Image (cartoon, grey):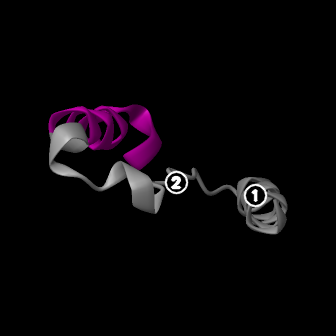
Amino acid sequence: MRNKSRDLSVTRTLRSQGWHVLRIWEHELSRKNETRLVQRIKRVLQSNVCR
């Protein structure tokens, strides 16, 4: 729980400074999630967020 609380605090701080946050959890880094994760990253990179 402490990590989630810290992550939420960090996310709020970064967003207040104009950053967009894409958090990838360690458990998402597996072969079975690879396609879904790549698609998620592509969506963010292709959005106006990165321009």
In this picture, is 3 found above or below 22? below
Rendered location of residue 42, percent (x, y): 23, 38
Q: Which residue is mark 2?
A: 23
Secondary element under disc 2, as helix, strand or loop, is loop
Residue 51 in view of the camera: no
Rendered location of residue 29, percent (x, y): 30, 56
Residue at image coords 15%, 48%: 31
Q: Is residue 45 magenta?
A: yes
15 relative to 21 in the view: left or right = right
Please tell me how crowded label 2 is: few (under 14), some (14-19), or many (20+) other residues with Cα within 10 Å: few
Q: Amino acid type of disc 1?
A: Lys
Residue at image coords 74%, 67%: 3
Q: Is residue 48 magenta?
A: yes
Task: Say whether disc 1 or disc 2 marks the residue closer to the N-terminus.
Answer: 1
Secondary element under disc 1, as helix, strand or loop, is helix
Residue at image coords 75%, 62%: 17
Q: Which residue is mark 1?
A: 4
In this picture, is 6 found above or below 34? below
Report the front residue among 11 and 32: 32
